[in-house]
Image (tube, rainbow, N blue to C red):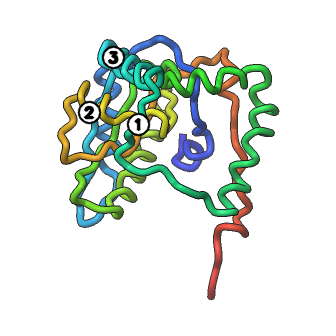
């Protein structure tokens, strides 16, 4: 699989098999991802992996927070508003779901709120001192991790929902207060029989996003 093939093949996986990921596979993925670029070689990513009972307790904490109507506590604020172009692109998701997933669409809400029943969630954190630029580096690291996982036969999905209640995650995984929990990535072996994993969203025309000047 070439790099280009991996980029094109990758899609967000929302249903997983109840199969744990071997430690050696995790080691190979994180070793590859560590080669990601970063400003002045700062390598600002700090990674915490929740599996098994730890992930079960995090899910339970999220459910309790929802039941108690607790205000969400993400470390990084969610966008207050999207640009018109972003709204236009987002508006295409519904049609893509109908086309690719059919009746499996009904699972989206439940799976999203339950971290897609993935066997593990990778939480990527960054020191609060670093500012916004390190978030670019975190994004590069996330993409490297996702593509390395794909090569190992794993699926992933980056999820804002998975970091809505950072106080729960921080307590369970003993994440120090100097770190912001930037993003959670559900990871595991895709369920090949669930049509929800068929979703492939469209990409905008290059002419709308790339400008060439000579």
Q: Are marks 2 and 1 in contact (CB under 8 Å)?
A: no
Going from N to C along the chain, the mark reached first, 1 or 3, is 3
Q: Is residue 123 left or right of residue 154?
A: left
Q: Which mark is residue 170?
A: 2
- Nearer the observer, 12 or 183: 183
Distance, label 1 to label 3, CA atoms, is 14 Å
SS assignment at label 3: helix
Check disc 3: other Cα within 10 Å, few if <14, some if 14-19, many if 20+. Answer: some
Q: Are marks 3 and 2 in contact (CB under 8 Å)?
A: no
Check disc 1: other Cα within 10 Å, few if <14, some if 14-19, many if 20+. Answer: many
Distance, label 3 to label 2, CA atoms, is 12 Å
User: Where 167 falls versus 102 (above or below)?
Assistant: below
**Residue 201 rendering spot, x and y as whole percentages:** 70, 43
The residue that appears at 58% across and 35% down in the rendered structure is 12
Res 31 quadrant in image: top left
- Nearer the observer, 173 or 40: 173
- Write down the residue under mark 3: 57
User: Where 173 falls versus 83 (above or below)?
Assistant: above
- Write down the residue under mark 1: 163
SS assignment at label 1: helix
In what quadrant of the picture does the C terminus appear?
bottom right
**Residue 2 rendering spot, x and y as whole percentages:** 54, 45
Res 25 quadrant in image: top left
**Residue 190 rendering spot, x and y as whole percentages:** 55, 22
Asked whether the viewer can see residue 184, the reply is no
């Amino acid at each position: 699989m070439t790099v280009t093939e991996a980029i094109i093949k990758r899609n967000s996986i929302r249903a997983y098999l109840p199969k744990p990921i071997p430690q050696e596979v995790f080691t190979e993925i994180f070793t590859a991802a560590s080669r990601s670029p970063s400003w002045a070689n700062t390598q600002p990513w700090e990674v915490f992996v929740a599996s098994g009972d730890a992930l079960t307790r995090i899910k339970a904490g999220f459910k309790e927070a929802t039941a108690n109507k607790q205000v969400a506590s993400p470390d990084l604020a969610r966008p207050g508003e999207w640009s018109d172009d972003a709204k236009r692109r987002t508006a295409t998701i519904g049609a893509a779901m109908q086309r690719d997933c059919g009746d499996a669409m009904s699972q989206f809400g439940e799976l999203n709120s339950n971290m897609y029943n993935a066997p593990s969630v990778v939480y990527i954190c960054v020191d609060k001192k670093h500012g916004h630029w390190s978030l670019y580096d975190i994004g590069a690291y996330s993409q490297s991790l996702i593509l390395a996982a794909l090569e190992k036969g794993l699926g992933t999905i980056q999820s804002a929902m998975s970091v809505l209640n950072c106080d729960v995650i921080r307590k369970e995984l003993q994440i120090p207060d100097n770190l912001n929990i930037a993003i959670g990535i559900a990871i595991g072996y895709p369920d090949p029989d669930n049509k929800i994993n068929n979703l492939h969203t469209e990409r905008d025309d290059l002419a709308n996003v790339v400008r060439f000047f000579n």
